[in-house]
Image (cartoon, rainbow, N blue to C red):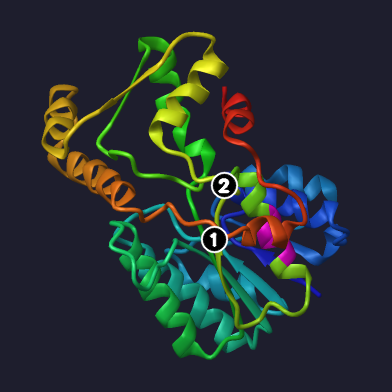
């Protein structure tokens, strides 16, 4: 079976290829799709085939998908443009008769009010309409998303957010990469929609304690209202669009968009998910 990993030079894609090989995939059966193939030279050294794949250039997508059996569609990072980018991969997979399409979506994508959910919902709908056999991986937050908070709180002793007591069932990128590798390699997952999250849903007081443990200094969680948070971000020089996006994310977390976890990720990968402190230490 030949497996194409899109966005292979990104933080998640690299880990997926590592996991595929660690789980016994022949490097020669893996195709690493990359916008800049020079950045994928380390894969070529392992025997992985590297091919150009740019979501914004459908001709490269069509060429990359041709002849492969399974495709991992890693969601794009350009918010507002992702649906069209993903559609290029879905259309190419349908035309090529791909036997399995795995997509990295967002928690409760079809029903969530999270500001990031609509593009994932639209993508899931495109996949369903295409008829391509698929596995949907609704990934919760990556612990690595908190690198900036870790650095700032370690420097100032304060973690600031407007999430209230909202909880996050985060796991490491490596955990989610392992889940993608399992979905690609194993039979029995077609048609499944997996809600994936860490074993523990923690709140921001827990996050502050974890940062304190990693940084070696006390850290206080300062809970702000949405209005107070927006004002603080404005004073820090952020533009209105970014302020709206950040506060909307925090509102989603406050309202429980990332709080649910039922152990599906751990069961899928065959081990416990990465604890918060351990994940933050890796980031630090």
Q: Check if mark 1's residue and mark 2's residue have beta carbons within 8 Å.
A: yes
Q: Quadrant of residue 20?
A: bottom right
Q: Quadrant of residue 2?
A: bottom right
**In the rendering, at what x and y percent does residue 227 appear?**
11, 36
The reply, left or right, for residue 177 in relation to residue 28 is: left
Name, please, the residue furthest toward the top. 217
Instruction: Determine if residue 148 is in view.
Output: no
**Label 2 Cα neighbours within 10 Å, binned few <14 / some 14-19 / many ≥20:** some
Q: Secondary structure at mark 2?
A: loop
Q: What residue is drawn where x is 56% and y is 76%?
A: 62
* Residue denoted by label 1: 74
* The magenta segment: 178-182
The reply, left or right, for residue 218 in relation to residue 95 is: left
**In the rendering, at what x and y percent does residue 225 appear?**
16, 35
* Residue denoted by label 2: 10
**In the rendering, at what x and y percent does residue 247 appear?**
22, 42
Quarter of the N terminus within the rendering = bottom right
Q: Quadrant of residue 180?
A: bottom right
User: Is residue 217 depicted above or below 115 in this figure?
Assistant: above
């Amino acid at each position: 079976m030949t497996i194409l990993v899109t966005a292979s030079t990104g933080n998640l894609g690299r880990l997926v290829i590592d996991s595929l090989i660690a789980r016994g995939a022949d490097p020669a059966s893996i195709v690493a799709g990359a916008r800049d193939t020079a950045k994928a030279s380390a894969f070529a050294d392992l025997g992985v085939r590297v091919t150009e794949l740019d979501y914004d250039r459908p001709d490269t997508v069509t060429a990359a998908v041709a002849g492969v059996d399974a495709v991992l569609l890693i969601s794009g990072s350009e918010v507002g443009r992702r649906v069209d980018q993903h559609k290029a991969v879905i259309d190419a997979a349908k035309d090529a008769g791909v036997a399995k399409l795995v997509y990295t979506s967002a928690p409760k994508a079809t029903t969530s009010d999270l500001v990031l959910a609509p593009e994932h919902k639209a993508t899931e709908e495109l996949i369903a309409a295409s008829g391509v056999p698929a596995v949907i991986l609704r990934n919760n937050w990556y612990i690595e998303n908190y690198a900036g908070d870790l650095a700032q709180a370690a420097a100032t002793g304060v973690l600031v957010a407007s999430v209230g007591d909202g909880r996050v069932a985060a796991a490491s990128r490596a955990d989610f990469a392992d889940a993608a590798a399992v979905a690609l390699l194993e039979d029995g997952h077609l048609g499944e929609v997996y809600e994936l999250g860490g074993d523990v849903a923690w709140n921001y007081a827990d996050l502050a304690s974890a940062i304190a443990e990693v940084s070696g200094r006390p850290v206080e969680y300062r809970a702000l209202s949405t209005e107070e948070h927006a004002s603080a971000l404005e004073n820090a020089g952020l533009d209105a669009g970014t302020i709206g996006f950040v506060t909307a994310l925090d509102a989603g977390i406050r309202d429980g968009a990332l709080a649910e976890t039922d152990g599906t990720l751990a069961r899928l990968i065959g081990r416990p998910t990465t604890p918060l402190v351990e994940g933050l230490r890796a980031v630090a």
